[in-house]
Amino acid sequence: MKVEAYGSLTRRQEDLFRLGYYYKSLAAVTLLTTTDALTFKARASQNVDGHVLASSSLKVVGSKVTFTPKRRTDGLQQYTLEYTPNADLKLKGELKTKQTATSRTADSTVAVEYRQPTYALKLAVTDPNLGVRLSGTTEKDGRGVGVDGTFDVALQRFATYNLALWTTEARHSLVFKHNGSDKAAYSLGDFLFSYYNEASTSIRLGALVKYSYPRKDTSIEFGGDYRYDEKTVLRGKVNSLGLLGLGMTRNLNEYLRIGLAAQFDVKKVKASNVSDYHFGLRLDFTT
């Protein structure tokens, strides 16, 4: 198993708390069409305030080059070009540009990533706020260390300075991170402890504990999902603010999947009614 890049160290935990919770969308519809060389995705959603947002993207895959343009109705334009010279994916180059309706110029990033079974390295240059980001991870016998930092050319100092330590096995992982972003002086920032566990083939569990040294506050979140059967996944999470999230996705057939989600503030749940809640519905069509 290859070592993860720095940005992917806690992706399994983050996805466990993020994916499948649609309560910010009153209704959402996604259309996905895939071939060997092309993937087209269109999505439209209406949030609880009545605002409608639509987006479309096209992924074109060649032998060495992948091109992905994306547009949204709020003015976002994003274009990504990836170049992989070898089939083993050890070396990859990426050019990404992103512009919103309110920005005068596009934000651009040029990155090069190199991977081996025991380490991963990445160098990225950003513009117009010129910065150089360096990150690296290495792992041996399930124990790893990673560093990540962005050097701001205008400030002549590191604007971010991050460190990660972890232990991982096939079914569980524990990750410690420190994220520093004080641009005035080097100081302690946010500490993150995350745990991921595949308790069985149908149950996944996770926990996130975050302590902010500047603000002196702590947040905690627990959650997981349960694969009820081959078509249905049930989800649940709760955090230290008292917010309870519930979700369910079910494949109705090979072309259609439905998702339901709700969020409740358990501090405001009374015997007679629930005063603070959100509900969401999502339909995914795949052809």
Image (tube, rainbow, N blue to C red):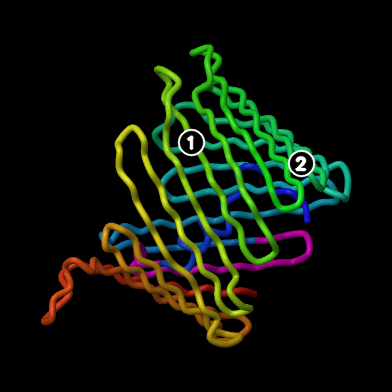
In the image: residue 39, left or right of residue 36: left
Q: Circle 2 sits on which residue?
A: 119
| Foreground residue among 50 and 142 | 142
> How far is disc 1 from disc 2 in space, using C-alphas?
21 Å
Q: Amino acid type of disc 2?
A: Tyr
Where is residue 165? Give x, y as percent. 60, 43
Is 36 contained in the magenta span? yes
Q: Amino acid at mark 1?
A: Asn
Please determine whether, in this image, residue 128 is positioned above or below residue 200: above
Q: Which mark is residue 235?
A: none
Q: Is residue 238 magenta?
A: no
Q: Which mark is residue 179?
A: 1
Q: Residue at x 79, y 42 (%)?
A: 115
Looking at this view, is 9 or 232 the one in front? 9
Quadrant holding the N terminus: bottom right
Q: Which residue is at 57% across, 49% downward?
A: 70
- Quick one: label 2, few (<14), some, or many (20+) residues within 10 Å? some
Q: Which residues are magenta?
A: 22-39
For the C terminus, which image quadrant?
A: bottom right
Secondary structure that dominates the magenta span: strand
Q: Residue furthest left?
A: 272
Report x, y in % for residue 32.
60, 67
**Relative side of 89 to 269, left or right:** right
In the rendered image of this protein, does residue 150 appear above or below residue 63?
above
Where does the image place residue 80, in percent across and percent down from the top left? 65, 42
